[in-house]
């Protein structure tokens, strides 16, 4: 037990300091600012510190070697405070600032109400360097949605009354209108070492997978009906069964054996022609270990192709009997006989450990593939994607399957692709 009276100074009547004169303030002129605090030569300890100091003055503490060494505190998330040099230097807002703020607010209102006049004044005094106000308003476009970094959790919002797509604006009314476009939308993830493959090798195979997706879904020659020579050249030659099957399908497409569209996107220019050069793309690529010192790459991308009719848009009728489509026009004279095909590709690539397994370096082993072909004619297996146009002659000769099952949203990437049973034709909620 200790007595605080041993450590706390209590003023007494014997204090030699003369009392302050009546009417005067001993603290007049004293400023308790930051400089005063920092300039203090002595600091008052806590009550516990003063008590222990008094106790240990007469009876020092015993050996404290049993105590653990102090450890650094854990890092915590925090908001960065202002720099110390700025703390305390901010001056109170003066009365002159209020009218200045009011004048600035009034000026902004006037500029907003007379934007055209301000533009003319700027154009006159800046030698025509000011941007065209009207053109800037007309050319405003919505911001593009970034490529996916994780699978979405729900389907895109459905627009109540989507506008009719035209040749000039083929993506209007579609969720793909804000998607990124072309090869740049296929973003390769940051590589790191996996199994026996260094980060450099992993990056090389990720880029090779991207190149395969581009060559099999975005190559202009392929989209115009050419053979997928470049894409097939990236498949491991040791994968002979797949390569042999693809060559057979492309040479002799049929509904029983396949027609190559499970891996390649091609259009017959006699039936459908790509409208422009823009293809919208959305998806993601990931990679992990295959569990056997190899590399497993997973790619899941949706491609949206805007198309206009070719000379013979009805693929089901004999070409010699089908007349070219007459395009419908809106009130502004825009051609509106436009179709969109939405193709979703899910691709799994395996790069095995070259020590344990046979593998051709710098090639890809396609371990699994899945797809959704939305807006391609049912019952037609000719090696091409066959979009249906609004004004084309009625599809079919009576032998194609009829649409069945619940309607599917082809833009919904929150669910895996839905495979149709042979001889069936699914329904789409939108295209």
Image (cartoon, grey):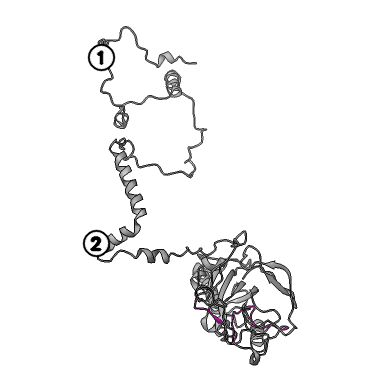
Residue 202 visible in image: yes
Residue 161 spot, x, y in % from top left: 59, 64
Q: Is residue 59 above or below residue 115?
A: above
Does the magenta-highlighted stretch encompass residue 56?
Answer: no
Q: Residue 230: x, y in percent? A: 54, 83
Q: Residue drawn at (41%, 63%), measured in percent from left and top?
A: 137
Q: How many marks?
A: 2
Q: Range of the magenta residues?
A: 256-277
Q: Is residue 264 magenta?
A: yes
Residue in front for this viewpoint, 6 or 411: 411
User: Main SS type for the magenta part?
Assistant: loop
The residue singled out by tag 1 in the image is 24
Above or below residue 277? Residue 194 is above
What is the spatial separation of the Cα atoms under label 1 and label 2, in whole angstroms?
Answer: 66 Å
State the SS at label 2. helix
Q: Nearer the viewer, residue 191 or 302?
A: 302
Q: Nearer the viewer, residue 386 or 311?
A: 311
- Please, which residue is most extreme toward the front here? 331
Q: Earlier in the sequence, mark 1 or mark 2?
A: 1
Q: Is residue 194 above or below residue 254?
A: above
Q: Which residue is mark 2?
A: 125
Label 1 or label 2, whichever lies nearer to me, is 2
Q: Quadrant of residue 282?
A: bottom right
Where, by quadrant of the figure, is residue 229 drawn?
bottom right
- Extreme residue in the bottom direction: 320
Task: State the mark number for residue 233.
Answer: none
């Amino acid at each position: 037990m200790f007595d605080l009276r041993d450590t706390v100074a209590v003023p007494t009547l014997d204090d030699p300091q003369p009392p302050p004169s009546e009417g005067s303030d001993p603290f007049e002129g004293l400023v308790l600012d930051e400089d005063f605090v920092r300039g203090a030569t002595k600091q008052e300890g806590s009550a516990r510190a003063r008590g222990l100091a008094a106790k240990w003055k007469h009876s020092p503490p015993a050996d404290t070697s049993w105590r653990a060494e102090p450890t650094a505190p854990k890092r915590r998330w925090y908001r960065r405070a202002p720099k110390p040099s700025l703390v305390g230097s901010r001056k109170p807002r003066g009365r002159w600032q209020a009218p200045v703020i009011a004048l600035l607010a009034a000026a902004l209102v006037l500029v907003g109400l007379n934007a055209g006049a301000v533009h003319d004044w700027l154009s006159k005094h800046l030698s025509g360097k000011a941007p065209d106000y009207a053109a800037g308003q007309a050319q405003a476009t919505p911001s593009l949605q970034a490529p996916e970094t994780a699978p979405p959790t729900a389907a895109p919002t459905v627009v109540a009354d989507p506008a009719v797509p035209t040749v000039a604006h083929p993506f209007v009314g579609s969720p793909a209108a804000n998607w990124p476009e072309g090869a740049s939308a296929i973003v390769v993830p940051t590589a790191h070492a996996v199994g026996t493959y260094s980060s450099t090798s992993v990056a090389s195979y990720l880029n090779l997978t991207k190149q395969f997706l581009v060559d099999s879904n975005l190559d202009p020659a392929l989209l115009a009906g050419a053979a997928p020579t470049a894409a097939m050249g990236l498949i491991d030659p040791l994968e002979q069964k797949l390569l042999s099957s693809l060559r057979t399908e492309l040479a002799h497409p049929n509904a029983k054996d396949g027609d190559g569209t499970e891996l390649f996107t091609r259009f017959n220019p006699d039936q459908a022609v790509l409208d422009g050069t823009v293809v919208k793309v959305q998806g993601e690529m990931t990679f992990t270990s295959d569990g056997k010192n190899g590399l497993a790459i997973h790619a899941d991308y949706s491609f949206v192709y805007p198309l206009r009719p070719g000379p013979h848009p009805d693929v089901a009728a004999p070409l010699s009997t089908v007349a070219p489509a007459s395009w419908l026009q809106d009130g502004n004279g825009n051609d509106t006989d436009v179709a969109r095909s939405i193709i979703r590709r899910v691709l799994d690539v395996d790069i095995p450990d070259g020590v344990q397994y046979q593998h051709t370096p710098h090639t890809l082993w396609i371990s699994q593939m899945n797809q959704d072909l939305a807006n391609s004619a049912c019952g037609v297996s000719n090696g091409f994607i066959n979009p249906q146009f609004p004004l084309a002659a009625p599809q079919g000769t009576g032998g194609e399957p009829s649409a069945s099952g619940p309607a599917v949203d082809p833009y919904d990437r929150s669910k895996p692709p839905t495979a149709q049973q042979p001889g069936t034709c699914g329904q789409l909620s939108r295209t």
